[in-house]
Image (tube, rainbow, N blue to C red):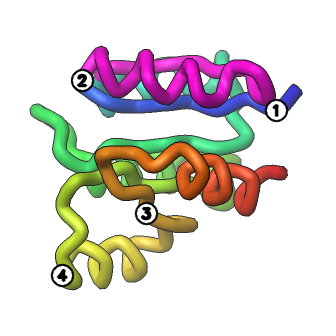
Amino acid sequence: MKKVLVVDDEKMNLRLVERMLKCDYDVATASSGKEALDRIEEEKPDLILLDILMPQMDGFETLEAIRGLAGWQDVPILFLTADTGEDVRAKAREAGVSGIVEKPFKKDVFLEEVRACIG
């Protein structure tokens, strides 16, 4: 079973995403960018779902740190965000994310994005 690491500072979002994915994927969660970086080697996710707006380390900083880790340059990363302005989308594309999933989540769109990344 493929593994997904979900990174979001909102516990409600972590639980929601975990419920949507747990039937088809092994789901691990982290409540901050730092926690995600601490857990990435042990979890070895096939996909990372990463909130953009988080305290201390935002999604862009976390993405940059993940890409700086040996062996993690190619793991697909989907941003999770309520901020879907064109400036955020452009910055995300420039940063090399696999896609953006809008909050609040629409289950069918969300699952389609996940499947497009890892099947």
Q: Earlier in the sequence, mark 2 or mark 4?
A: 2
Disc 2 packing (10 Å; few <14; some 14–19; many ≥20): few
**Residue 78 visible in the displayed image:** yes
Residue 99 vertical placement versus 118 (above, below): below
CA separation in Å, label 3 and label 2: 17 Å
Do callouts 1 and 4 mark residues in contact (Cβ within 8 Å)? no
The image quarter containing residue 73 is: bottom right
Q: Which residue is mark 1?
A: 2
Disc 1 packing (10 Å; few <14; some 14–19; many ≥20): few
Q: Earlier in the sequence, mark 1 or mark 2?
A: 1
Q: Residue at x 49, y 19 (%)?
A: 29
Measured as percent of width and height from the top left, residue 119 is found at 83, 51
Residue 99 on the magenta span: no
Q: Which residue is mark 3?
A: 100
> Magenta region: which residues?
10-31
Q: Which mark is residue 87?
A: 4
Residue 62 vertical placement versus 21 (above, below): below
Label 3 amino acid?
Answer: Ile
Disc 3 packing (10 Å; few <14; some 14–19; many ≥20): many
Q: Which mark is residue 10?
A: 2
CA separation in Å, label 1 and label 4: 32 Å
Measured as percent of width and height from the top left, residue 118 is found at 78, 51
Q: Earlier in the sequence, mark 3 or mark 4?
A: 4
Q: Earlier in the sequence, mark 3 or mark 1?
A: 1
Element on which disc 2 rests: loop
Measured as percent of width and height from the top left, residue 77 is found at 54, 54
Residue 33 vertical placement versus 12 (above, below): below
108 or 5: nearer the eye? 108
